[in-house]
């Protein structure tokens, strides 16, 4: 989503101490402000060249809303006319089942497979508290190495606050490790997909 750089910096966290305590930083500076290292779930959040990093201004840590939305698996929308950033966190619950009846009622849910298995199964997604219109959503499955091995997209084009969606997949679990099922939403045609829920299938 194209958002003016400075207008992405709307989240700040108050820090103890005076602003003078942050006059210099071991992580370098950003436009005269000392940069800080950002940790999310005990993992460092890297920033690419050209991205606005986390920094300290007037005693507060400031970082892009995009970082917050990604960590919360939430949607972020910029309204240029109103100069407003909106963050929406829909509730998305997913599960997978090997055996499904013709009416998509569940017979055999699962969470693990053997390496080398090729399975027909269905992914079920239950979505509610979706308070903003969306363009489309997709369900994708990713191997332990990050490669996308299956995907299904569905256009919505409008308001749909709650819905239930099943879809069949056929996947070979060729690697050991965690296969990740991702549910992603595209707020509008100009936006990228945002992951709002994940489900792990362990391959051993």
Image (tube, helix red, strand yellow):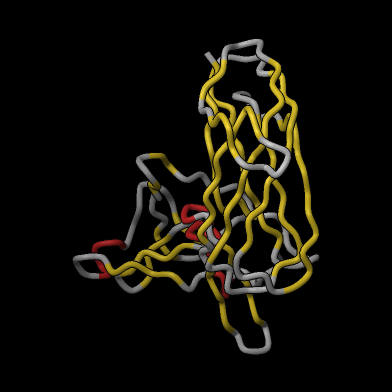
Is residue 9 shown above or below 192?
A: below
Q: Where is residue 187, by image quadrant?
A: bottom right
Residue drawn 70% across the image and 17% down it: 118
User: Among all residues in the image, which is located at the extreme left?
Assistant: 17
Residue 126 lies, in percent from the top left, at: 57, 54
| Residue under the point 61% across and 70% down | 161
* Residue 151 higher or lower than 128, as above or below: above
Q: Which residue is at the far front?
A: 102
Q: Which percent across, then down, holds residue 151?
A: 76, 39
Image x and y of residue 30, in percent: 49, 60
Residue found 61% across the figure and 37% down from its top: 181
Q: Give the residue displayed 42% in from the left and 66% down from the top.
A: 62
Residue 121 location, quadrant: top right
Q: Nearer the viewer, residue 160 or 141?
A: 160
Image quarter hosting the N terminus: bottom right
Left/right of residue 22 with respect to residue 145 in the rendered view: left
Please state if 1 lies on the left or on the right of 43 as rendered: right
Residue 136 appears left or right of 62: right
Between 199 and 65, the residue placed more toward the observer is: 199
Q: Could you tell whether 15 is left or right of 180 in the image?
A: left
Tally of marks: 0
Q: Nearer the viewer, residue 95 or 42?
A: 95
Task: Say above or below: 132 vs 191.
Answer: below
* As drawn, 38 above or below 15: above
Locate residue 44, reporting x and y percent.
42, 42
């Amino acid at each position: 989503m194209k958002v003016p750089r400075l207008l992405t910096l709307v989240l700040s966290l108050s820090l103890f101490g005076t602003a003078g305590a942050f006059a210099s930083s071991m992580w370098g500076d950003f436009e005269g402000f000392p940069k800080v290292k950002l940790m999310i779930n005990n993992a460092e959040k890297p920033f690419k060249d050209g991205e606005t990093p986390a920094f300290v201004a007037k005693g507060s840590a400031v970082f892009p809303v995009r970082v917050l939305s990604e960590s919360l698996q939430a949607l972020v929308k910029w309204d240029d006319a109103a100069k407003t950033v909106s963050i929406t966190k829909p509730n998305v619950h997913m599960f997978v089942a090997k055996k499904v009846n013709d009416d998509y009622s569940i017979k055999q849910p699962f969470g693990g497979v053997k390496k080398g298995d090729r399975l027909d199964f269905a992914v079920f997604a239950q979505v509610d508290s979706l308070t903003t219109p969306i363009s489309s959503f997709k369900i994708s499955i990713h191997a332990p190495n990050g490669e996308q091995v299956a995907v299904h997209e569905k256009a919505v084009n409008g308001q749909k606050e709650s819905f239930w969606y099943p879809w069949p997949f056929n996947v070979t679990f060729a690697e050991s490790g965690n296969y990740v099922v991702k549910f992603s939403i595209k707020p509008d045609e100009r936006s990228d997909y945002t992951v709002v829920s994940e489900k792990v299938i362990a391959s051993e």
